[in-house]
Amino acid sequence: MNNNSFFKYSIYFFAMFIVSTVLHAQKEKSVEGNIDNLPVKEYTLTINEATINKTGKAVKGMTINGSIPGPVLEFTEGEYAVIYVKNEMSVETSIHWHGLLLPNFYDGVPYLNTPPIEPGHTLKYEFALNQSGTYWYHSHTLLQEQSGVFGSFVIHTKNETLKYDKELVLMLSDWTNEDPMHVLRNLKRGNEWYGIRKGTSTPLNQVIARGAFGAQLNFWRQRMEGADIADVYYPAFLINGEESIEYPEFKSGEKVRLRIINGGASTSFWMTFGGEDPLLVSADGIDVEPIAKNKTFIGIAETYDYIVTIPQEGKIEFKIMAQDGSGTASAFIGNGKVFAAQTLPRPDKIGMMQTMAKMDMKMGAHALKYRPGKDESIEMKNEYGMQMKDDMSGMNMEKSNTDDTKAMKMEGMKISKDSTIAAMHMDHSKMNAMDDKMNDDAKEMDTMEGMDLFSEYNYDFLKSPEKTNYPEGTPVKEILLNLTGNMQRYIWSMNGVPLSETDNIKIEGDQVTRITLNNLTMMHHPMHLHGHFFRVINKNGEYSPLKHTVNVPPMQDVTIEFYGNEYGDWFFHCHILYHLMGGMARVMSYDTPPDVRMKGYPASIAVAETNLFYSWGMVDASSQNTTLNLVASNMRNQFNASVEYGYNENLEAEVTYERYLHDYLRVFGGVNIENEIEDSLDEFKTTAVVGVRYLTPYLFSLDARIDSDLRPRIGLGRSIMLFPKFSVFGYYEYQLDFGWVNTLPSGSNTESETVWSAGAEYFLSRNVSLLGSYDNRFGGGGGLSVRF
Ligand SMILES: [Cu+2]
């Protein structure tokens, strides 16, 4: 620690001492003090950097009390939780209590609600437990949760009505051997290796073999590579930290309550159970109407409780499969022969692409729009997403937001033409007429295929035992949030605006906030609201379930609503950590005075985490030339440097700054240096350049520019993965000189220069490819491409 930070810490501690003394004196008035003399239960969590070996490879990770996951924190409803979180790492950390209703200051989002826990320091969390169920906790600092900073939080109810003998917490997670920040950097640079490594990429040969080239063109036209399910390659998926784990302590005939938590950083799972179908009793910590259900999808950060019965002379397999089919893990509960869980097939990405192409969807809504300050959410919803066939569009209806169960038959289908966010109440005769029409047309209607593709992701199986709707007449505020994303730059946002470019969303107290989450991307987004439970409107109408996290499938919409009875600022974000870091987040603000204890911890620091600069580089070393490319990029700004040297003594170097106007369009300016006469490194020509770069439909990179000699130039490039690990690329560039500045050889009005190259690349690993190319300046050759 240097003197400067020592001084900072001293000031901080002195301030904290004053503040806590004052607060202590005021405790009688504080909502956070244990004024009711509740029974106190204490835990200490110590967070450490550690070497972890989950896959036969020792890597740097983070542990809580020495393990991944951290310990199960067990409480009983009505207790007063006191948890000391001790940071023994060299970096700051935080703990967020996921799904818990607690004072805003203890929610644990650093800089937004709670001070970060500095290295060597301990933070005391304390709050009364006024709920029961299965919850969890995790770091909310950068990608620390991916490194291992997470664990489960169980609150037993005071009067249990469910019948079971024992219980078992099953914490699901994903494990990478890479530094998570490097994973994110690879996603930002568009490295295709993760898809190749897990076998989920869809090279052109497979697309053509399946007769899906038309669908592929449809996707390319809309600047999409394909239907992506998960971005990150994981060498292992874990249940309580293991790929396969045994629980022999459970005996035949015993009923066991499984408390299942998805603590994955970016993996949702399909869960299956051996033996008889288990009884689903709770979702996100709250009891639901018990229902026998086997195959279930668990989105990131969701929790489900099941009651299973251990079979006679056997053990149950509980199996999870990563949503994209890239891996599984199993837990075995009981003894004896295995009652195997169903093995699910890998999802068929090419088939999905074909179905989606048929559904007439408009993709490519901006993740980074031109004017972030202008609300165009409704226009965006109308323009993008699933389009209705003409014969249905005249009906001008939106999926009803009322509790009319009839209307819920439209669940999973979206009709966006001419619709507005305002819910339209339909009378029953109209609804019946529509039902008939839908049934008649179901076979031919392409749009209906979408219902099959995503119907297994709806929440209709969840029914609250009690009514959850709000008293009639409660004022309702409607908010539309289109979920938007850009795979090429790995930017994720809402309404085309990432967190760093928007204001807080104002939440009014004593009224209902109803949010329509309209997913305009090809990925699922598990959306989590801190400090609240919201109703997820489904076919159960008044009995719609309460949740803290809701998964929104691709090109679908889900409506949630909650009653405003809190204060302070609460985070609302996609729980795919890499999407959160990519900007898919908002702050929901009650606009109440800030907590004095947060002085010196501006929320802007939390926001800045979603707008970091990522930098990367690449060297292509071939027998005929060598090129070096360096990039540093955040949401709107990018710096590029490149040097190209041919062994025929042709050299070109360029440095540019670019500004993204929106996802596909950037303006740039910079300096270009080139040797005037080929085969001579004596004479260099330096020019200033300005221009635009544009990603065209069908994914061509276009570069149109003019230099300080008033010479216009246009360049066009594209690469396509033809076979697994094998892609081809081409580049064409044409420059004209009208002699406006330069003196042209006598007799000619214009002079032109053409540059082109084409080649192929074979991926050997994440960072190395074999390269073969021909360039009209340098000739043909081969070599290596190294990414760093
Ligand atoms: Cu997301």
Image: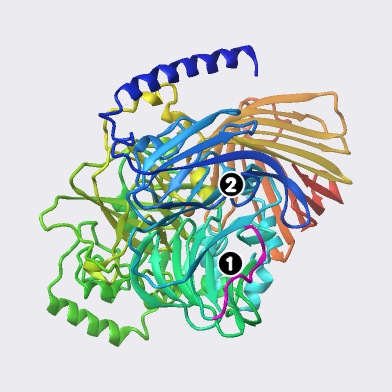
Q: Do tag 2 and tag 1 residues touch (Cβ < 8 Å)?
A: no
Secondary structure of the magenta portion, mostly?
A: loop
Residue 276 tag number: none
Cα–Cα span, label 2 and label 1: 33 Å
Task: Tell me the element at label 2.
Answer: strand
Q: Is mark 2 within 8 Å of ligand 1?
A: no
- The location of residue 448, given as percent across then percent down, is 37, 77
Task: Tell me the element at label 1.
Answer: loop
User: Which residue is more in the foreground, 444 or 473?
Assistant: 473
Q: Give the quarter of the figure containing the N terminus.
A: top right
> Which residues make up the magenta segment?
241-252
- The location of residue 487, given as percent across then percent down, is 54, 53
Amino acid, disc 2: Leu
Q: Residue furthest left?
A: 473
Q: Is residue 120 above or below residue 99?
A: above
Mark 1 residue crowding within 10 angstroms, few (<14) / some (14–19) / many (20+) = many
Q: Inspect this view and state whether residue 710 appears.
A: no
User: Which residue is more in the foreground, 22 or 320?
Assistant: 22
Verify whether residue 103 appears in magenta. no
- The location of residue 703, given as percent across then percent down, is 59, 42
User: Which residue is more in the foreground, 680 or 666?
Assistant: 666
Residue 702 tag number: 2
Sequence-wise, the earlier of marks 2 and 1 is 1
Residue 324 tag number: 1
Residue 643 as seen in the image, left or right of residue 399: right
Q: Inspect this view and state whether residue 661 appears.
A: yes
Residue depicted at 18% across the width and 77% down the height: 431
Mark 2 residue crowding within 10 angstroms, few (<14) / some (14–19) / many (20+) = many
Verify whether residue 243 appears in magenta. yes
Q: Give the quarter of the figure containing the C terminus.
A: top right
Frontmost of labels 2 and 1 is 1
Residue depicted at 54% across the width and 51% down the height: 151
